[in-house]
Amino acid sequence: MGPHDGRFAPSPSGPLHLGNLRTALVAWVRARSAGGRFVMRVEDLDRGRSRPEHEERQLQDLAALGIDWDGDVVRQSDRDPAYAAAVDRLRELDLVYPCWCTRAEIREAAGAPHGDAPEGAYPGTCAHLGAAARAAHEERGRPAALRVRAGAVRSTAVDAVRGEITAVVDDFVVRRGDGTHAYNLAVVVDDAWQDVTEVVRGDDLASSAPRQAWLATVLGHRAPTYMHVPLVLGPDGRRLAKRDGAVTLEDRLALGEDADDVRSRMAASLGLCGPDERPTPAELVDRFDVSAVRGTGPLRWDPVTGPLA
Ligand code: GLU
C-alpha cells in the first residue's frame, strides 16, 4: 500500500455534475501521479434514492473523462455483513448504545450548549439510560438506532489541502432504526477494506473527517489521510446543482462539447493547463501537483459561459 492509494465513492442518486466530476478527476490524478491504486465504490446504502441507471451513467461519465479504476466496482449494498461485523466489534468494545431520539428531539436538546461539543452535536440523551428507561422505550416499540460512544473525544484528521482538521467527536449513529448501516460506519469499513490510504473528496465532507478517522482507529485500522477539494458553486454561491443550467456531462455534450473539452476545462480550473490546451489524461497525471488544489478556493460556475473560473 502506498500513501496515495485513492478512491471515488459516488452516491447513485442522480447524475454527477461538473463539481463532482472535477473532484473525481482530482482524486484520480492525485493517486495515479503518485503511482497509487485507484478504486471505485458505489455508495448505494440509501435504497430509496439509489438507482442502477444513475450508477451506470455515473460510471460511464467517469470513464469518458479518462478516469479508470483497479479491480471491480464495490457496491455498499453488497457489504452489509462487513458493516454488521464492525458493529459487533464496537459492541464488544462496549462502545454502542441504542438511541430512540428523533431528529426533532435532538435539534431541540442540542440547542442547549453541552461541554465543548460542536453545534448540533448529539446531546447524549440516550447515552446513560437506566434499565427501566430502556425497557420503557422498548415497550413503546419504536426501533432504536445504534450510536457509537465517542465520549466527546478530540480527533485530528490530516488533510493535504487544509492541514490538520481537529474536532470534538460526538456520539454518532452507526446503524439506523430501520437496520440500515450509516454512511459514517460504511465509509470507514470500506476505505479500510479497499486499502485506501488517502481519501480525496469534496470539501463539504471535511467536517466528517475527524469522526471517521477516530472510528477507523477504534476499529483497529490506520486512519487514512484526506484531501478535501474546494467545491464548485453555482452563481448564487450555493453548491452547484441542476438548477444552475447545463452542469452534467450529458448537458455539455448536448451543447456540442466533447469529453476532452470538459476535462480540459476542469484541468484549466486547476491550473494544470492553459485555456486553449487539451491535455490527455496521461498528461494531467504527469503535470499534477497538489499545490494546484491548495491554490484554489471554491469555484464559481457561470451558467452562460460555463467556465469553471
Ligand atoms: N458518497 C458520498 C457522496 O457522493 C461521498 C462520500 C465520501 O467520499 O466519503 O457525496
Image: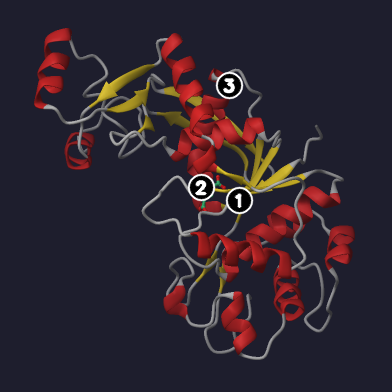
The answer as to whether callout 2 falls within 8 Å of ligand 1 is yes
Asked if residue 282 is positioned above or below residue 166 in the image, the reply reads below
Disc 2 versus disc 3: distance between alpha carbons? 19 Å
Q: In percent of the image, x 82 and y 58: which residue is there?
A: 288
Labelled disc at residue 217: 3
Q: Looking at the image, do the residues carrying marks 1 and 2 touch, with CB atoms under 8 Å apart?
A: yes
| Crowd class of label 1 (few under 14; some 14 to 19; many from 20; radius 10 Å) | many
- Comes first in the chain, label 2 or label 3: 2
Q: Secondary structure at mark 2?
A: helix
Residue corresponding to mark 2:
205
The amino acid sitting under disc 3 is: Thr
- The type of colouring in the image is secondary structure
Position of the N terminus, as image quadrant, is top right
Q: Nearer the viewer, residue 185 or 267?
A: 185
Which residue carries the number 1 mark? 201
Where residue 121 sits in the image (x, y, percent)?
32, 34
Of 54 and 7, which appears nearest the observer?
Answer: 54
Note whether residue 277 is visible.
Answer: yes
The 10 Å Cα crowd at callout 2, few under 14, some 14 to 19, many 20 or more, is: few
Callout 1, which amino acid? Arg
